[in-house]
Image (cartoon, rainbow, N blue to C red):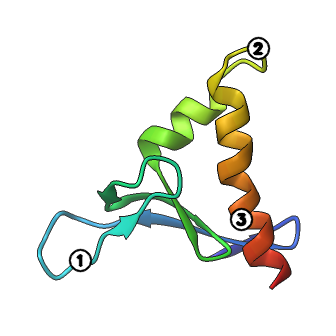
Amino acid sequence: MIELAGLEVQVVKSSSDNDSPSSECIVCGRQMNVGLKICGQFICSDCEQEIVHTEVSDPRYLYFIQCMKQIWLAALS
């Protein structure tokens, strides 16, 4: 785990073994084993890449902003 801009960030790279728990992505809702945990909120690697490559003019951009607010709310609590 690292601290970035005052937020706890953890890179999650679990295998798909039964003993490796998956996390629910705050963007797509899927249970995944690879992604980022920021302040305890999980973003799968697929959604992370989609967020990074989405233009501001894309209609999905506002949805991603709403999802990211969950991270800030977790950080404030």
Q: Amino acid at mark 1?
A: Ser
Other residues around mark 1 within 10 Å, as few (<14) / some (14–19) / many (≥20)? few
Give the x, y percent position of residue 32: 32, 58
- Pointer 2: residues within 10 angstroms few (<14), some, or many (20+)? few
Q: Position of residue 75 (x, y in %)?
A: 79, 76
Q: Amino acid at mark 3?
A: Ile
Q: Earlier in the sequence, mark 1 or mark 3?
A: 1
Q: Which residue is mark 3?
A: 71
Q: Is residue 65 above or below residue 67?
A: above
Q: CA distance from mark 2 to mark 3?
A: 22 Å
Query: Mark 2 sits on what residue?
Result: 57
Dot 3 crowding, Cα within 10 Å, few <14, some 14–19, many 20+: some
**Front position in the image: 63 or 37:** 63
Image position, residue 5 (x, y; %): 88, 64
Toward which corner of the image does residue 17 lie, by quadrant?
bottom left
Q: Secondary structure at mark 1?
A: loop
Q: Nearer the viewer, mark 1 or mark 3?
A: 3
Residue at the location (69% across, 73% down)?
A: 2
Question: What SS does tag 3 mark?
Answer: helix
SS class of the residue under badge 2? loop
Q: Residue at x 65, y 38 (%)?
A: 63
Mark whose residue sits in front, 2 or 1 = 2
Q: Which amino acid type corresponds to the residue marked 2 in the rendered image?
A: Ser
Residue located at (23% from left, 77% from top): 20
The quadrant of the image that shows the C terminus is bottom right
Q: Is residue 69 above or below residue 46?
A: below
Tell me the number on the disc at residue 20.
1
The reply to whether discs 2 and 1 touch (Cβ–Cβ < 8 Å) is: no
Mark 1 and mark 3 residues within 8 Å of each other at the beta carbon: no
